[in-house]
Image (spheres, rainbow, N blue to C red):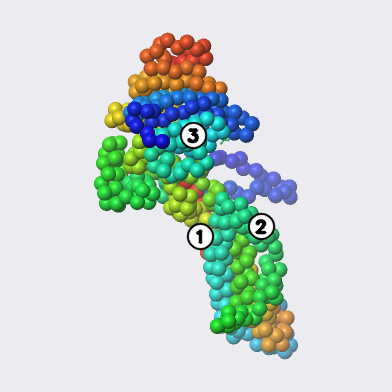
Amino acid sequence: MNWTPDQPMVSIKNVHKAFGELEVLKGVSLDVMKGEVICIIGPSGSGKSTLIRCVNALNDIQQGSILVEGQEVNDPDLDKLELRKKVGMVFQQYNLFPHKTALENIMMAPVRVLKRDKSQTEVFARELIKKVRLQGKEDSYPGELSGGQQQRVAIARSLAMKPDIMLFDEVTAALDPETVGEVLTTIKELAEDGMTCILVTHEMGFAREVADHIYFTDGGLIVEHGPPKTFFDKAKDPRTREFLSQIL
Amino acid sequence: MARPEFKTDLPVMLAPPERRQGEPLRIKLWHGIALFGFCVLSSTYVFADDTQAPASALSVLVKWMPLLLSGFLFNIVISFCSMALGTIVGTALGLGQISLIPVVKSSSWFVTQFFRNAPWLVLLFFAMFLLPFEFDLGFVVIPFPDWVKAIIGLSLPVMANVSEVVRGAVRSLPSGQWEAAESLAYTRQQTLWLIILPQCVKRMLPPWMNLYSILTMATVLASVVGVSEVMTLTGEALAAEGGRTDLLAPFYSFVLLIFFVYCYPIARYTVYLEKKFAVKD
Ligand SMILES: Nc1ncnc2c1ncn2[C@@H]1O[C@H](COP(=O)(O)OP(=O)(O)OP(=O)(O)O)[C@@H](O)[C@H]1O
Ligand SMILES: [Mg+2]
């Protein structure tokens, strides 16, 4: 059970997941090392969201194993709260708490969940706001912020928990084209700082730039994977090539 | 929007003139008061040539007004207490309905449905005749006078409706709020109290106030079980005046009027809140 950094931080093995009759994941395996950034791409409905939601136990799985820092996620006795303290997640729809200001959104979980000291958390939260370039927006409510700004608050809110791994599920898909860039920049800086990231994205240029490894899913399976250069230039599987030709 | 002018000599009904935008048909407070005045005057007029020439209906009404108003005050007290009690128990019941514990969930659901689909008057009788007139705790005896039983009886349907309002408000929040909280390691309890319910208060306010209006009007049901609220007192006053038929219209118009004056502003404010919240989210 003792995890050391030379082992994969997230190790997904032969995961099967079905919603009732519908089999969404049919045996997916992948490893993520500490500090690595991986991107999952693939057509709509291929199970990308389902897969990363399994990593922080928002979805349960029927078969297979997911180890997060050596902790088995597919375990009825799993302490979900402990797992989620280590794994941050950012959603397509931001999901900020609309009745709290940006600063409160960021501070609330560390103070209430982790019982951290309030004034120290505030200092840290303000640093995070600066990091995502939202100085001056501390006291704004989510409704007063643009989509891109809200998404950066959501990223800061996750980071405030000091997670070891961050999950991003198409976090730019709901944004105006002009604001996509500011969010991607934030994620890129995060990746450069050494954060372990699992990203689902449709931004191929971005994936190519930041990813250490790219996985292509189709029909609940990983059809092809590799480092960006090989993946984009020398894809072997016809499904991958068709997908890339459509999207690039 | 320009609109062609229709003219005809035939006896058909023309469409009413278009109202200006943002100015819906509104009943104003003075409409109600005018109606009341009309009732009183017309009834006085109808009986004006009575040979006995008794005291005019209006002056009789004025004489009884203080008593009737004090009766109405009692209606308001009943409405406040029933609302408070119903809201507290109903909120607990509503939270029970969204519980993850199956037995809590299903029993809360059953109680809610049972009391929501029962006539208010039946519930009132139910409380009147099933509750003891006092409650012996061993060391202290709590008396249950009729008006307390009426409060409990009326709070039952309020409870059931508040339960549904709570459940509806929680359900109306996007599931993303729950998921975001879950992924930040909030417990279910924390999610509910820190994130979900604060957002629900705003959504619950208009239906809750609506319910209060309905309850206030339903407090007159307590007259059926002998609580001396405004309707009971009106009946007694009329009896004391010797059952003069010319007094019926002014007296009951007056009761209608005070309910209208009390409930109508609440209804307006509810509509205002609904509009305000609809714009915001
Ligand atoms: N909670 C659920 N209940 C039932 N079916 C679900 C549920 N969540 C997802 N699905 C189904 O699982 C399949 C995979 O969904 P998923 O959201 O993982 O796809 P995706 O690859 O993320 O697609 P997209 O690019 O559109 O986000 C879809 O067919 C979807 O309808
Ligand atoms: Mg998805």
Amino acid at the residue labelled 3: Cys
Closer to the N terminus: mark 1 or mark 2?
A: 2
Q: Is residue A146 visible?
A: no
Residue B64, image quadrant: bottom right
What's the amino acid at mark 2? Phe
Q: In which quarter of the image is the N terminus of chain B?
A: top right
Nearest the camera: B246 or B266? B266
Do the numbered discs 3 and 2 sit on residues whose CB atoms are within 8 Å?
Answer: no
1 and 3 marks on the same chain: no
Amino acid marked by disc 1: Tyr
| Rendered location of residue A85, percent (x, y) | 39, 42
Asked if both marks, 1 and 2, belong to the same chain, the answer given is: yes
Q: Where is residue B154 in the image (x, y as percent from the top left)?
A: 62, 69
Q: Is residue A55 left or right of residue B94?
A: left
Residue density around tag 3, few if under 14, some if 14–19, many if 20 or more, within 10 Å: some
| Disc 1: which residue | B269
The tag on residue B110 is 2
Image quadrant where residue B107 sits: bottom right
Q: Position of residue A79 (x, y in %)?
A: 46, 44
Q: Distance between the residues labelled 3 and 2?
A: 35 Å
- At 59% from the left edge and 41% from the top edge, which residue is drawn? B3
Classify 10 Å Cα crowding around label 2: few (below 14), some (14-19), many (20 and above).
some
Judging by the rendered image, the residue that carries numbered circle 3 is: A54
> Which dot, 1 or 2, sits closer to the camera?
2
Where is residue A88? Give x, y as percent.
39, 38
In front: mark 1 or mark 3?
3
